[in-house]
Amino acid sequence: MLRLLSFALLLAVWWTAALFVGGAKLPSPPAVLEVMIAEASSGALFLHLGATLARVILAFVLAMSLGSAIGYLMGRVKLADRLGDPWLILLLNLPALVVIVLAYIWAGLTEAAAIAAIAINKLPTAIVTLREGTRTLDRSLDEMATVFAVPRWRAFRHVVLPQLAPYIAASARSGLSLVWKIVLVAELLGRPNGVGFEIGVAFQLFDTPRLLAYSLTFAAVVLVIETLLVQPFEARATRWRPRAA
Amino acid sequence: MRLEVEITGKTFKNAAGETHEVLASVKFALQSGEVGVLIGPSGCGKSTMLRIILGLDRDFSGHIARPPEARIGMVFQEPRLLPWRSVEQNVRLAAPGITDAKLSELFRILELEAHRSHFPGELSLGLARRVALARAFAVEPDLLVLDEPLASLDDALAGRLRDEIATLVASRPVMTLLVTHSLDDAIRLGDRLFVLSPRPARIVQEVPIGIPRAKRTEAELARIRSELAAVQLESK
């Protein structure tokens, strides 16, 4: 209820501002909705949304799985941590734009270059989060599993993973928002389709309604993914914890 | 089966880089069906000794001969249950092969039936200890290691759990190693007592208790207790 109210307030502010500023700079909500409907009925909206979403998913899965594995290794093995740490600091501080431009220069304006560049941007934060999570693992539980001769994979699945799950969920949540912000830049710079590409076109034409139509639709899709996938996973991962009163 | 323990030294370095000797000389053997008790003052290195015997710590001088096929059941000082698994799932993780009938029997003996589906966060310490015991017995161990399993429980509960341990130990041939600082637990459960000195620990005396557990009357226990008190006085 409160959420709806807050959303309504946002709409009201937007609408009022649009009246003052004028439709060219800030179109009113109905004007944006009109463009959304037009783009949706021509099918272009879904085409671009689909392309962007596919890139988000591929880059996200790539960065999360690779980042989690490296983070776990660095949390467990001191040598890996020592070796990997300088690389990690470099990656963490490398601007997204630099990675994307370099990837396009080195690998051409290809799909692989775009996805790799997006994944590399997410990779270091996934590593850092999982490394932290791995460092907090309860050694006494590891010992318990060892003494009871629980097979390695079973121990990983039932003793280690549940302890890492909250960290994976946190990393997934921040990762999703990071990836979808960067994917638009990568599309703007070197892809012939996707929401980022459309925003680039809209920018060249100063077409604000189109810009807002595409970005808001995409934001809505991300919100749905977040609510339907990430939040339930987070809730499941922390289900066993005693509820705070 | 037979467990042979021969530790000739164990040291560790503290944060300041100083070397401390934890264990000096500990040598004993244990047969199937026997309950050995390591008894000594708090902080004398008993838990370190257990870690060595269980293979969790390999940085020591000496030798441990433990049949490689020996199944180990362990009750740690803290219950060490997985908070995200129910009581039953905790037991089944350690003992995946246990039959439903055997599990139910164990839960009945330890009075855990009502708590099967509870999570460890919902259990009192006494209950969690019982789950840890159930887990240790569920694996049908050849070597059962109990590290202060009754510490910080009230007397009535400790007494009942002690009886339950005695019953379970009698029900199958198992080498049992009990670590305690309670003389009472030691003489009620043990067949042989290994009395340890303060750190660095060595075995001061080995005391066999000839009377079967079931026949230890209060009078017998009092006699053993006074004998042991004399031993401990001598060792000081």
Image (cartoon, coloured by chain):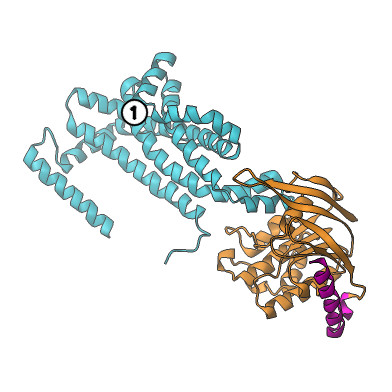
Chain colours: A cyan, B orange
Q: Quadrant of the N terminus of chain A?
A: bottom left
| Residue lying furthest left | A20
Where disc 1 sits, the SS reads loop
Q: Does B103 appear above or below A47? A: below
Task: Write the residue at 73% across / 68% down.
Answer: B181
Task: Write the residue at 64% across / 53% down.
Answer: A140
| Residue lying furthest bottom | B219
Would you say A224 lies left or right of A236 here? left
Task: Write the residue at 78% across / 62% down.
Answer: B197
Protein chain holding label 1 = A
Q: Quadrant of residue A182?
A: top left
Q: Position of residue B177 (x, y in %)?
A: 81, 62
Q: Position of residue A82 (x, y in %)?
A: 55, 31
Q: Which residues are magenta?
A: B213-236
Regarding residue A36, the answer to whether it shows in the image is: yes
On whether residue B139 falls in the magenta region, the answer is no
Q: Position of residue B3 (x, y in %)?
A: 87, 54
Would you say A172 lies left or right of B223 here? left
Task: Write the residue at 13% across / 45% down.
Answer: A15
Estimate how packed mark 1 is, as few (under 14), some (14 to 19) or many (20 or more) residues with alpha carbons within 10 Å.
many
Look at the magenta stretch and give its main secondary structure. Answer: helix
Q: Amino acid at mark 1?
A: Gly
- Residue of label 1: A194
On whether residue B221 falls in the magenta region, the answer is yes
Q: Nearer the viewer, residue B69 or B212?
A: B212
Q: Nearer the viewer, residue B80 or A16?
A: B80
Q: Position of residue A49 (x, y in %)?
A: 34, 33
